[in-house]
Amino acid sequence: MNTIAICFVCLGNICRSPSAEAVMLHQVGKAKLADRIVVDSAGTGDWHIGHPPDERAQRAAKARGYDLSMLRGRQVRIEDFARFDLLIAMDDANAAALAKVCPAEYRDKIRLLMEFATRDDSRVVVDPYFGGDEGFERVLDQCEDACEGLLKALRTQLVA
């Protein structure tokens, strides 16, 4: 039985990527695919290694039934490019940062999360860190939409 491993990536791994990880874990669990789809998250920067997600991200997620409290920030490691089937960046800057350190044979694994969205035509998940609570709600809206599309795409790979 084949499995698919995905890693969501943002700058510090305390807002967008842990939110995407929690949303995707929830959707994978609902679809009864937790044994087939591995989900993780990381940051391109090293400022928040070992830190829990931003309190505002945790609060917004908790209100929707997602628990971020056990997640801890980590930085993308070179071995992640071999380990994961997809490294899904939240924006162009993080996709570029990944491409800069990615071994050439793995560059096709780097994608933008919003490529998978079906209702929101935004190109990127905007960083809510320097804004108010509404930014964290928007991140969750985008993650819910895009993760639904991603899960649909992954299902076709699991069948193949």
Image: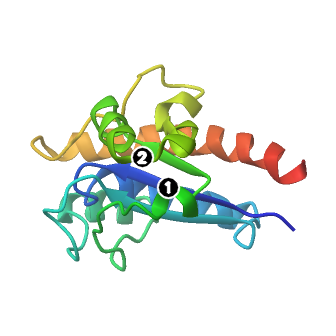
The residue depicted at 31 percent of the width and 40 percent of the height is 94
Helix, strand or loop at label 1? It is: helix
Furthest toward the left, the residue is 130
**Three-letter amino acid code at disc 1?**
Phe
In the drawing, does residue 143 fall left or right of residue 127? Answer: right
Q: Nearer the viewer, residue 8 or 65?
A: 8
The answer to whether marks 1 and 2 mark residues whose Cβ atoms lie closer than 8 Å is yes
* Separation of residues labelled 1 and 2 (CA atoms): 7 Å
Q: Residues within 10 Å of mark 1 (few under 14, many from 20)?
A: many
Residue 108 quadrant:
top right
In the drawing, does residue 152 fall left or right of residue 2? Answer: left
Residue 111 picture location, percent across and down: 51, 36
The residue depicted at 30 percent of the width and 68 percent of the height is 74
Q: Provide the residue designation for mark 1.
A: 81
Q: Provide the residue designation for mark 2.
A: 102
**Three-letter amino acid code at disc 2?**
Cys
In the drawing, does residue 118 fall left or right of residue 19? Answer: right
Q: Residues within 10 Å of mark 2 (few under 14, many from 20)?
A: many
The residue depicted at 37 percent of the width and 63 percent of the height is 77
Disc on the earlier residue, 1 or 2: 1
Residue 28 picture location, percent across and down: 66, 61
Please give the count of numbered marks on the rendered protein.
2
The residue depicted at 25 percent of the width and 60 percent of the height is 14
In the drawing, does residue 148 fall left or right of residue 146? Answer: right
Q: Nearer the viewer, residue 96 or 61?
A: 96
Name above or below for residue 91 compared with residue 129. above
Residue 131 picture location, percent across and down: 12, 40
Q: Nearer the viewer, residue 29 or 48?
A: 48
Q: Nearer the viewer, residue 11 or 152?
A: 11
Name above or below for residue 159 compared with residue 72. above
